[in-house]
Image: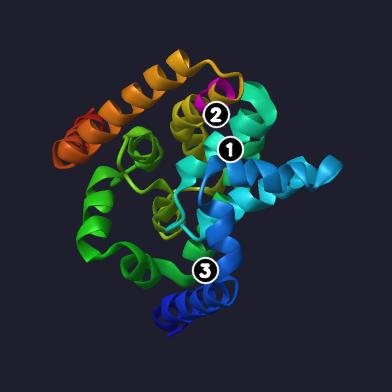
Amino acid sequence: MLSLIGFPLSLALLGGLAFSFRAELFGLFRSAESIRGWVAERGALGPAAFVGLQALQVIVFVIPGEVVQVAGGFAFGLLGGTLWSVVGILLGSLFNFGVGRALGRPFAVAVLGADTIERIDASTKGGRAAAGFLLLFAIPGIPKDALTYAAGASRLSFGAFIAVSTIGRLPGIVGTSYMGSAVFEQDYAAAIVVVSISAVLLFLGLVFRERLHGFVERVISRRRRR
């Protein structure tokens, strides 16, 4: 019963909070520069504030994560932005994983839809759940923040989840952090190159999402037969 009402209740709670602080949230998440300014105002607590903001973005997955990740590179440089984004995303992902594990499959279906959950099941079936989720986290265009809820409701172990979600996301985090760092250093040529590559990868991920899902399913099926 809890799994059936968990999503509507959590959605209502988040919606109420978002409405109450709509002006602040809109102003904060409107650009990477506004996030950087907000972080800079926290002084020595800036990294901790950014980590909390990044974790919030993962939990409230409708917030565009790329804006926050770019802001990390803008505020802390490539290495610092990557580090603090990884920490914040991991914390938010662990929260989502725990919620998915506690509320189960009905909750995951409510978040992602029955068709998507069935495709995820097909891509992670058997004893290859970790390999399947690693590929899903690495494919551009897949909603990775929402995917963490589904991972919690799956057979994936806690330790494997930490590994595959971090490794699968890392290239994208590095790319967006580099983009923010390049903009801060006014290296606009490098930023344009990264944006162009990211846009192409995202486009391909969206266009060929079904084929990529099918590829993951075939890879998992072949490994199961070995």
Find residue 122 and report its horizontal and vertical position in percent: 22, 48
Depth-wise, is mark 3 or mark 1 nearer the camera?
1
Q: Which residues are magenta?
A: 178-182
Check the picture and name the quadrant holding the C terminus: top left
Q: Which residue is mark 2?
A: 180
Q: Which residue is mark 3?
A: 102
Q: Residue 214, can we see it?
A: no
Q: Residue at x 51, y 40 (%)?
A: 160
Give the x, y percent position of residue 220: 25, 35
- Front one among 151 and 178: 178
Task: Name the residue furthest right.
Answer: 44
* Residue 202 drawn in magenta: no
**Residue that appears at 57% across and 62% down:** 25
The kind of residue on which mark 1 rests is Ala
In this image, 196 relative to 77: left or right? left
Of residue 153 and residue 25, the one placed in the foreground of this image is 25
Q: Say if residue 45 shows up in the picture.
A: yes
The image quarter in which residue 105 lies: bottom left
User: In this picture, is 217 found above or below 201?
Assistant: below
Dot 1, crowdedness within 10 Å: few (<14), some or many (≥20)?
many
Is 189 situated above or below 212? above
| Contact? badges 2 and 1 (CB < 8 Å) | yes
Question: What amino acid is at disc 3?
Answer: Ala
Task: Say which residue label 1 marks.
Answer: 71
Q: Position of residue 139 (x, y in %)?
A: 32, 34
Q: Is residue 41 left or right of residue 58?
A: right
Disc 2 residue type?
Gly
Question: Percent position (x, y) of residue 19?
Answer: 52, 76
Mark 3 → mark 1, Cα distance in angstroms: 32 Å
